[in-house]
Amino acid sequence: MVLTLAAGWLAQRAVVMIWQKSTGHAAPRDLDDDQITVIQAVGFAALSAGAAVLARRMTYKGTNRAIDHFVAKDRFAEES
């Protein structure tokens, strides 16, 4: 759970940094703000959601790989 939260936090930081570099503007904090266009709100929401899903999937796969590795080591140690 901690790894998933950390991955989500890092993904959000990356999204904000990418948004600032590509648009030259700060990332929107309130998507309902009248100063933000619909295209900006939808684009930022899509980028954020995509980064969150990617982070969650990578964390899930990495955690499972690590668990499999440690379980395999324990089985090898028991057999020796």
Image: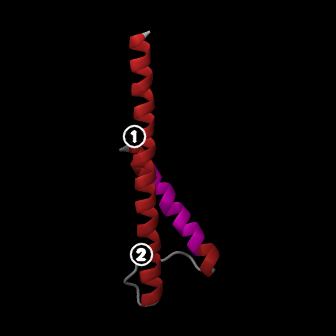
Q: Earlier in the sequence, mark 1 or mark 2?
A: 2
Helix, strand or loop for the magenta stretch, by majority: helix
Q: How many marks?
A: 2
Tell me, yes or no, whether the highlighted magenta stretch contains residue 61: no
Res. 15 in view: yes
Residue where numbered disc 1 is placed: 64
Q: Residue at x 40, y 61 (%)?
A: 53
Q: Is residue 21 left or right of residue 12?
A: right
Span highlighted in magenta in the image: 6-19
Please name the residue that numbered disc 2 is placed on.
45
Q: Which numbered disc, 1 or 2, marks the residue closer to the eye?
A: 1
Whether residue 25 is situated above or below residue 2 in the rendered picture = below
Image quadrant of residue 30? bottom left
Quadrant in the picture for the N terminus: top left
Amino acid carrying mark 2 in the image: Ala
Task: For label 1, count other residues whose C-alpha is less than 10 Å away and answer few (under 14), some (14-19) or many (20+).
Answer: few
